[in-house]
Amino acid sequence: MLTLNQVLWIILTVAAVVVCAFLAMFLNQVRKTAREAETTLVKARGAIDELQVIESKINASLDNVGQVLAVSKKAVSGLSEATSFLSAKVIRPSAKYWPLLALPLLRVGLTMMKKRKEKKDG
């Protein structure tokens, strides 16, 4: 029969073997996780580089948009000035003559439309 010291020694040996096996599996899993983390980190660095390129392109495009807006603003202000000039200097002063011009122009337009219609109808 085994003595108490021998039984305790066997129990401690089995426990040490179990702990070593657990430690080996744990370290193996940590190694696999570290490899996966490294590949993920490489992919993340690549994605960050691509995002930086995209960011620089967007910033350049935004600079161009600012220039386009400035040019558009100048064009609209010029168009506004031209419209106000035409309104104030041409259309309003000649408004009293519009009825005299409109009736003959309408008659000419109607006769031209009738002639076209007659040509189509044959």
Image (cartoon, rainbow, N blue to C red):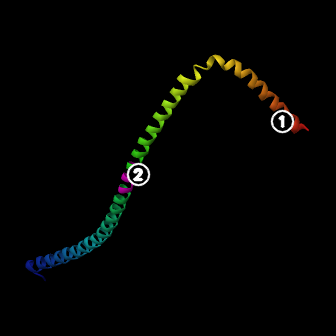
Q: Name the residue under label 2.
A: 61
Instruction: Measure how far apart labels 2 and 1 are at the Cα level.
Output: 52 Å
Secondary structure state at the residue bearing disc 2: helix
- Say which mark, if any, is on residue 3: none
Q: Residue furthest right?
A: 122
Percent position of residue 38, x then y = 29, 69
Q: Nearer the viewer, residue 61 or 30?
A: 61
Residue at image point 38% right, 53% down: 60
The amino acid sitting under disc 1 is Arg
Q: Is residue 54 above or below residue 77?
A: below
Q: Is residue 98 magenta?
A: no
Magenta extent: 56-62
Q: Is residue 26 left or right of residue 81?
A: left
Q: Is residue 94 left or right of residue 53?
A: right
Residue at image point 19% right, 78% down: 17
Q: Is residue 22 left or right of residue 72?
A: left
Which quarter of the image is occupied by the C terminus? Answer: top right
The amino acid sitting under disc 2 is Ser
Percent position of residue 71, x then y = 44, 42
Percent position of residue 9, x then y = 11, 79
Q: Which of 9 and 74 is in front in this view?
A: 74
Q: In this view, does 15 lie to the left or right of 61?
A: left
Percent position of residue 66, x then y = 39, 45
Disc 1 crowd rating (10 Å Cα; few below 14, some 14-19, many 20+) is: few
Q: Name the residue under label 1.
A: 116
